[in-house]
Structures are given as structure tokens and as C-alpha cells.
Image (tube, rainbow, N blue to C red):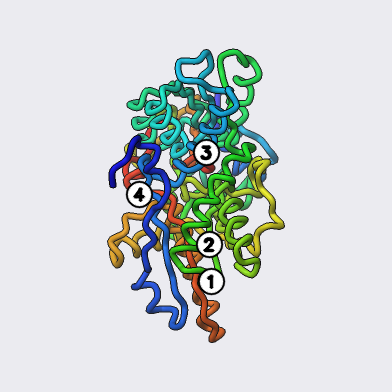
Amino acid sequence: MILDRLVAAVGNTPQVRLASLERDVPGVELWAKLEWFNPGGSVKDRAALSIIQDALARGQLAPGGPRALLDSTSGNTGIAYAWIGAALGLRVSLVMPENVSDARKKLTHIYGAEQIFSDPQELSDGAQRLARQLARDYPERYFYADQYSNPMNPAAHESTARELWEATQGRVTHAVLGLGTTGTAMGTGRGLRRRNPAIEVIAVEPAEALHGLEGLKHLPSSIIPDIFRADELTRTLRISTDEGWDMADRLREHEGLLAGHSAGAAAAGALRIARELSAAGKGGCVVCVLPDRADRYLSPPPTA
Amino acid sequence: MAITVKIPAPLRPLTQNLSEVALESAATVGAAVEELSRRYPGLRERLLDDKGGLRRYVNLFRNDQDVRSAGGLEAKLSDGDRLSVVPAIAGGR
């Protein structure tokens, strides 16, 4: 692959068959899209690039311009903004809960982003409130990207939908997607449904308010993102931290996939759907999106 | 003097929306968790697993020290200590 610039490498990620899981579900195809092949190591490269390109086109951001991109993030979006900002000459300021993993803090820091930490006990909602406040107080200093409300977040996943559609040659029947900002689920779901309205769009969310599925949001106890439309989901599966973590272990041990926690949860959801289909004697082609790789989680966050 | 326990946002529905709870006394972190659970049913299973150990994705800090490196649930508490319940992860993206 030869590229003019690194941002051209965002998207077109590999889709891999989960052969070891398929043995549990005769008659059903099970596929995973590996989003950690994006240059920043996660699915969030798509949303960040789409948001930044839109802001550049509208003149809200400019290389060497007066305003820095500001957003709240628990990590992956921040890493994506940080490297894309470096590549395009844009300053980036990130508000993160203080309990994000060390790996995420270090990565955003070495790309040169400004870091602002919010109260860890308020989680990502606290970071969102602080970013909103900073954007209100310093409009001349910041362009507030607001990934939870920015329509360019879901719009980025038209590409994800097209890639899934093309890779399965239109066979996809069920898409299983984790809920964080909800951009991946909303955008991928829309793109797939436009191609075939019968495709079922299934969301995965943590079963517990206090959970260990980093990157996923427990919506019943969180600020609901403006971009979220519950009626566009066929159904929502609630996955426990243990089920997600156990699936991440299984993917690593049997598929060689170093899946992160939210990836484990998405694959666990996909396997549940595939089991239902198989048990009912129905075929199907189930795809899931694996947001990032486990090396984002290897160091626990030592902070109070 | 007492022990102050800081409660993270996701658990506040269980603590009548209190972000801080004062315990008159608790000799250890485990005793503090037990006292909290007596007062606020449902907290115990959020913090501890089936075997009574601290859940893998829950961190407890005594003042600024992770109790996992200080004896875990056996870690001693003294008057004036602050115990913080901090989710190991932040959620959202």
C-alpha cells in the first residue's frame, strides 16, 4: 500500500471469519471487522477524521489557525484526534476522565495533544460536561468537536457499512455494534439498512452501570448522546463485563486476535445472535465490529 | 472524625444520589464495604464478586493509594481516611 498521506489509510480494515466460534453455530456465518488496523489503532480514526475534515471545510479549524480542536474522550477518539491533528497541523485539546488507562494518556501526550483531566468519579459524562464548559468559556480558543452530538461521527460509518456490505457481497443479515458515543452503531446501521432494509442492527451495551468494558457506555445511567436514535436499533443486548472479557480471552487464545474489552463484548453479542439463529435452524451472516486491540488496556490506571 | 467514602456517578442511584458517604468507623476497607452494603443494598454485588473479592474492574483507593497494593480488603483504615471507589475504566469514548 502506497499512500500520499497517512489519513488516506483510515478505513478499509480487514474483515476476518471467526472460524472457532462458527463451530458453535452450524449454518451461520460469523465475521469480525478489525478496526485496530486503522493508523491510530481504533475505529475512532473514522469519526475523528470525518469530524476534522468537515470542520476544515467549514473553516472552523485551520492549520496554524487560532483555535484548537477540543473534545471529551476516554481515549481512542483522543488518540485519533491527536495523530490526525499532528498530521494535518492542527492543535488538539482533550478532556479525559482521570481514570483512563495509562496507555491512552501516554499516547495522546506523545502526539502533542493538550490534556485536561476531569473527575474520575464522574466518568465520561464528567469529561463531557467539562469540555462543554470550556467551549462556552473560551469560544475564541477552541473549536468544540463534540463527538456525542456531531453528525459527522455517525456519517463516518457510511464507509464501515459499505465495506461490510462489499466484503460479505451483500449477504450480511445481522450487524452487532457496541454503544459508546453510539456513532458506530447509528452510522453503520443506517448505511447497511439503506442497502437492505431487512438487515438487523443489534447494539451491545454493558449490563452494569459500573462495568469494565472500556469504550462502551451504559446508556441508562449516562448522558444520552444527541446522535443516538433508539428506534434505529432492532434490539440491544446487555453484556456483562465477565462475558465480554471471557470472549476477549477466547478470541486471543483461539483466533490469535488480541481483542480489547469492547471488542470482546461485540463478539460475545454476535455469538449470542448466531446461537439464536442456529438453534432456530435459520442461516444468517452475522458481522461485528471490533473497535480496538487489548494493548490499549494492558496497564491499569493508578489514580484516585 | 470518620471515614469518608467517595461514590462514583454510576453507583449513586444506590446511595440516594450521595457522592460522599460518612462512616463513623471502619477498621478495614472490607469492613467499610460491609457497612456501606448494609446501608445501601445492592452496593455489595457491584463492588465484590461471588467469592467476596474486589471485582476486577473496581478500584478502591485509601487516600491516594490503591488498596490492592496495601492488603486489599484487609487494608487498615484510620479516622479521617478517605476511601474512593473508582471504576477501572471511564466508559464512552
Mark 3 or mark 4, which is nearer to you? 3
User: Contact (CB < 8 A) between labels 3 and 2?
Assistant: no
Query: Do tags 3 and 4 sit on the same chain?
Result: yes
| C-alpha distance separating marks 3 and 4 | 17 Å
Q: Which mark is residue A37?
A: 4
Cα–Cα span, label 3 and label 2: 22 Å
Residue visible at 52% across and 83% down in the picture: A279
Badge 2: chain ID: A
Q: Locate residue B77, reporting x and y percent.
A: 44, 33
- First-in-chain label (1 vs 2): 2
Identify the residue position indicated by label 3 in the image. Answer: A50
User: Is A124 drawn above or below residue A24 in the view shown?
Assistant: above
Q: Quick check: marks 1 and 2 in contact, CB under 8 Å?
A: yes
The residue beneath circle 2 is A176
Q: Residue A233's quadrant in the figure?
A: bottom right
Badge 3 or badge 1: first in the primary sequence = 3
CA separation in Å, label 1 and label 4:
25 Å
Amino acid type shown at disc 4: Phe
Q: Earlier in the sequence, mark 3 or mark 4?
A: 4
Whether labels 1 and 4 belong to a single chain: the reply is yes
| Residue at 66% in and 40% down | A223
